[in-house]
Amino acid sequence: MIKRFIRRVLGLPSEATQRVPRARHGLQAGAISPAAAKVCTVLREAGFSAYVVGGAVRDLLLGIVPKDFDIATDARPEEVKPLFRRALIIGRRFRLVHVMIGGETVEVSTFRSADPDTSEKDEHGRVLRDNVFGTQEEDARRRDFTVNALYFDPASEEVVDFHGGLADLKKRMLRVIGDPETRYREDPVRMLRAVRLAAKLGLTLEAATRRPIAEMAPLMERVPPARLFDEMLKLLLSGHASACLRQLREVGLHKGLLPLLDVILEQPLGERFVTLALAQTDERVLTERPVSPAFLFAALLWHEVLAASKARQARGERAIPALEAAMDEVLDVQCEKLAITRKLTATMREVWSMQPRFEGRSGSRAYRLLEHPRFRMAYDFLALRAASGEVPAELEAWWRAFQSADAESRKAMLLPDTGPRKRRRRRRGRGRPDAPPSEPAES
């Protein structure tokens, strides 16, 4: 203990720290992006240390192409910014520097301390503010998982490993740094991150990392809704949403915590629909095709809206007003814990409200629906409903053919209008005021 205290005071690395040469890990400097390499070079030439850190190192070691690169350095934000022509200091809880080089943005963070005495926490142990600079070893200690606490030095091509992250990667294991209960109290979102990373990377949760999750799950209720929304979006758009949700159920991080998870995981009527939606989303993410969060959330909540709408209709409400009220009801519940943005909820409402309109395939109604700005998204939603057996496949096939047909073919496809005709109101005062009333026709 005395040795650890002396090393900490003097800023010396611990005895467990390893500087692993390239021959043992195989990662080369050429694997990082040109922008990240330039940031490291500029910082190093200015007399500072600079390492690629976190998820980028982890992914490269697993043979995955990183989406972005983060740099950790001993330079303070105000020392980093003047070194680059396009750089911006951002953040409140964490002050970071975003360096823009070409079309890439590299995030540069200063080594931070993990001293619990200097962190501002709430009564439950959640860290509110810990923007205290420290050493590289302290920076590694405050990171969440061992596989995220690896530092790659492009100059020497060494990986600096403070917590056995390289060994854990070889064992395909995800392990939290430090005492799991303490770390989850500091930031309950780490429990969601553990599930997401394990599913995404194909890792097994270490027993001690997994054990407290079910018991500590209620801590999620104290996480700000906006942060929960961001984390849920990452989980659902990870490319492994189905696996993530199965893992959430297995570790006990679902029932009663987030209404969205209850809807997804405890959905008897819409299980096939939700399964298809998640599989479709995973496939699009993995093939690098665009995914609409509004479409995904609309799909995940559709059967909750449908159930609420049917309940209202059973109480005597008309179909369309019942659907509108059901949308409000479901979104109010979801947005209380998950800050789904107004832009997304507006799009979701449009997609939902257009579904009954697909039943109208006669007259001008079909043309008006086809011209709606959200038609394509709403049609894709209809196709998902047809694939799950919720609506007849013939309905989706008709709209698929109608939208690609020429004008004459469309006219021929229209069905007879069998709906009730609206009575046209006569306008008073039409015609000449002195005109005599029309006489009845002779029989």
Image (spheres, helix red, strand yellow):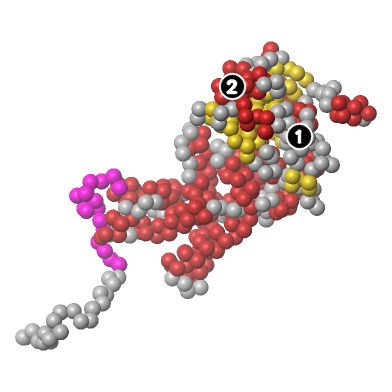
The quarter of the displayed image where residue 190 is located: top right
Say few, some or many: other residues with alpha carbon within 10 Å of mark 2 (under 14 / 14 to 19 / 20 or more).
few
Which quarter of the image is occupied by the N terminus? top right
Mark positioned earlier in the residue sequence (1 or 2): 2
Task: Please indicate whether residue 216 sits to the left or right of residue 29 in the image.
Answer: right
* Magenta residue check for 407: yes
Q: Type of residue at label 2?
A: Lys
Q: Secondary structure at mark 1?
A: loop
Q: Which residues are magenta?
A: 403-419
Q: In the rendered view, tell whether residue 350 sits above or below residue 310.
A: above
Foreground: 14 or 90? 90
Q: Secondary structure at mark 2?
A: helix
Q: Type of residue at label 1?
A: Phe
* Magenta residue check for 269: no
Q: Position of residue 83 (x, y in %)?
A: 62, 26
* Residue corresponding to mark 1: 133
Q: Residue at image x 48%, y 45%?
A: 292
**Would residue 64 be seen by someone viewing this image from the given angle?**
no
Farthest residue, direction left? 442
Foreground: 176 or 50? 50
**Would residue 430 be seen by someone viewing this image from the given angle?**
yes
Q: Position of residue 187 (x, y in %)?
A: 73, 44
Q: In the rendered view, tell whether residue 256 sits above or below residue 196.
A: below
Q: Position of residue 404 (x, y in %)?
A: 28, 45
Q: In the rendered view, tell whether residue 13 sits above or below residue 284.
A: above
In the rendering, which numbered label is found on residue 38? 2
Q: Residue at image x 65%, y 29%?
A: 80
Q: Residue at image x 70%, y 31%?
A: 76
Q: Position of residue 420 (x, y in %)?
A: 30, 70
The quarter of the displayed image where residue 268 is located: bottom right
Farthest residue, direction front? 82
